[in-house]
Amino acid sequence: MSKVEVSVVMSVYNGEEHLKEAIDSILNQTYSDYEFIIVNDGSTDNSLNIINSYNDKRIKLINQENKGLAVALNNGIKNSCGEYIARLDADDIAMPSRLEKQILFLKENEKCVLLGSNAIIIDQKGGYMYISNQPTDKNEILKLLENSSPFFHSSVIFKKDVFYKCGGYYEKIKHNFEEDIILWTRIKEFGELNNFKEPLIKFRLSPSSITTTRKKKHKDLHLSIAKNIIKNGDISEEDRKILNNITKRKSRSYKYGMYHANIGVIHLLINSDRKNALINFKKSIVYYPFSLRSWFFLILSILPFFFVKQWKKYRKIK
């Protein structure tokens, strides 16, 4: 294998809808010393045909049975030859100068072992929502890591040798989990964690994303289980049963209901866009009429904006 400085690793499972846009964003980087490893994790849609439509020597395709994100990423990294590993999910978009700016930062900050960035948040169709405000101070990053991930997984680049010292991604859970938080927590023992202030990716919210459909109480349980894995080195049978119970496959109506509810909340509380908030809360209730949260925000969006401001003040939303 010929050496490159960066290996970009992407796992794909039935990601045909946005895959081409994600691939193009990597192939159009201003930085050139990289390879692009795409792991097809047993897709049953048109994803493989989309990948095969590219005739680009930088792309290295790995086909495997569906084994989950962690296994796919470990497999991709195992077959990489870069000093650094950069991540991108199959529905996100890298800004053209992302790799160039991240490599320059890492070379100027030798103690940094993992670097993320802020993101432009977009909806399912690519519409602009807002720009994130991830912490850039090292201490704030470590503090946030105690209760959440301070990084967009698609934005990170890290040193491969440190990745292996940490044991790679935790593989014993197939479905989407907190494999990133487990890895970041282990990586912090080997150097500094940083976030680039400028948004270097577009992060897509979608009905299939666990980020937009998971309930808060389930997020807390996921985090608690992740902490137990970090502490004990493995998942207990009790935690596995809890995890299996809260990650049962949700219906399409539930996923779309939660997606539109969350998009509505962003429009109402962040963008002060009552019109689009109402549209999404109505869609949410059509898809999933049993959500008290959707009904609450629908009513809130109809009331005078004074009440929205009071809610934001109560929830400490700026």
Image: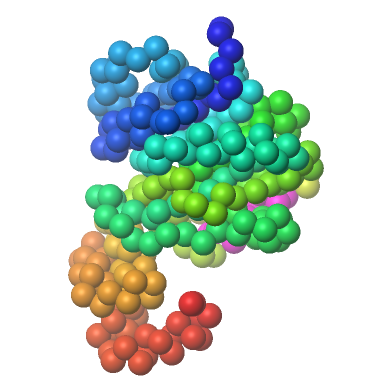
Classify 254 as above or below 104.
Answer: below
Counting every numbered tag in the picture gives: 0
In the figure, 51 relative to 265: above or below? above
Coordinates of residue 228 in the picture (x, y in percent): 72, 50
Residue 107 among those drawn in magenta: no
Task: Tell me: 187 left or right of 276.
Answer: right
Which residue occupies 43% across, 89% down?
A: 310
Percent across and percent down for residue 217 are 54, 65
Left or right of 120? Residue 140 is right
Please state which of residues 249 and 285 is positioned toward the viewer in this rendering. Answer: 285
| Most frequent secondary structure within the magenta stretch | helix
The image quarter in which residue 279 lies: bottom left
Q: Position of residue 263 (x, y in %)?
A: 32, 64
Q: Which residues are magenta?
A: 218-230
Question: In this view of the protein, which residue sits in the foreground, 160 or 285?
Answer: 160
Q: Can residue 293 be spotted in the picture?
A: no
Q: Is residue 223 magenta?
A: yes
- Determine the residue positioned at 28% across, 89% down: 303
Pick the residue in front: 235 or 118: 118
Query: Residue visible at 71% across and 26% down?
Result: 161
Along the line of sight, the residue nearer the viewer: 176 or 267: 267
Quadrant assignment, res 190: top right
The picture places residue 106, in percent across and down from the top left corner, at 64, 37
Q: Quadrant of the N terminus?
A: top right
Q: Is residue 28 left or right of residue 168?
A: left
